[in-house]
Amino acid sequence: MSAHDERVVDALALNAADLLAYFERRVDVPADAADLVAETMMIAWRRSEQIPAAPEHARMWLFVTARNVLANATRAERRRWKLANRLRLLIEPRQQSSADAGADVRDAVSRLDPQLAELIRLVHWDGFSLNEAAEILEIPASTARGQHQRAKAALRTMLSEPADTESVSR
């Protein structure tokens, strides 16, 4: 182990708990504090030649680094919030439907063969054309058209039956 590596190990061993406490007092989420300590340690390893030999100076160096790490994290968090707010303004709020709206259709689609169900979802829920859905599913367009007709027929049958036909037929 080089002298630089020993300095890093010693400095981190002596100051890790204090660095964690430093971050815990400054962030809202405790798990973030541990991540920030880890980032500070990574920087210490990358810049091991810059860490002073004297323990008290090494401690100061680590805390300056920790302060910079915290400032970077704070700036990044602010940028994320600004971006999220801009996106919220750009995206028109969708009209919320009741929780059970379409539940019978979702249930019927889920009872289809998985390939047919995915084709129905791609075409009717995600807005792809049959040809585009065929490409996504990596099947010929003619196969997709046939499967789409079968899936629609199966759905019509399932949706026209009374909800509890299975329990009556048992």
Image (cartoon, rainbow, N blue to C red):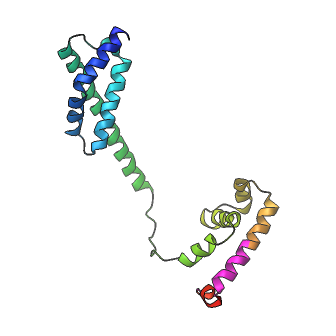
In this orientation, which residue lies closer to the viewer: 64 or 9?
9
**Image x and y of residue 14, in percent:** 22, 23
Q: Is residue 73 visible?
A: no
Magenta stretch, main secondary structure, is: helix
Q: As drawn, which residue projects farthest toward the bottom? A: 168
Q: In the picture provided, is 133 more to the left or to the right than 18?
A: right
In this orientation, which residue lies closer to the viewer: 23 or 124?
23
Q: In the picture provided, is 124 more to the left or to the right than 95?
A: right
**Magenta part of the protein: which range?**
151-163
Residue 22 falls in image quadrant: top left
User: What residue is drawn where x is 20% and y is 15%?
Assistant: 55
Instruction: Check the image and report above or below for 60 versus 139.
Output: above
Quadrant into which the C terminus falls: bottom right
User: What residue is drawn where x is 30% and y is 30%?
Assistant: 69
Residue 25 falls in image quadrant: top left
**Image x and y of residue 11, in percent:** 26, 19
In this orientation, which residue lies closer to the viewer: 94 or 110?
110
In this orientation, which residue lies closer to the viewer: 82 or 141?
141
Q: As drawn, which residue projects farthest toward the front? A: 170
Q: As drawn, which residue projects farthest toward the left? A: 56
Q: Is residue 129 visible?
A: yes
User: What residue is drawn where x is 36% and y is 25%?
Assistant: 42
165 within the magenta span: no
Residue 126 falls in image quadrant: bottom right
User: What residue is drawn where x is 31% and y is 34%?
Assistant: 36
Quadrant into which the N terminus falls: top left
Instruction: Check the image and report above or below for 145 versus 72.
Output: below
Instruction: Check the image and report above or below for 151 versus 129.
Output: below
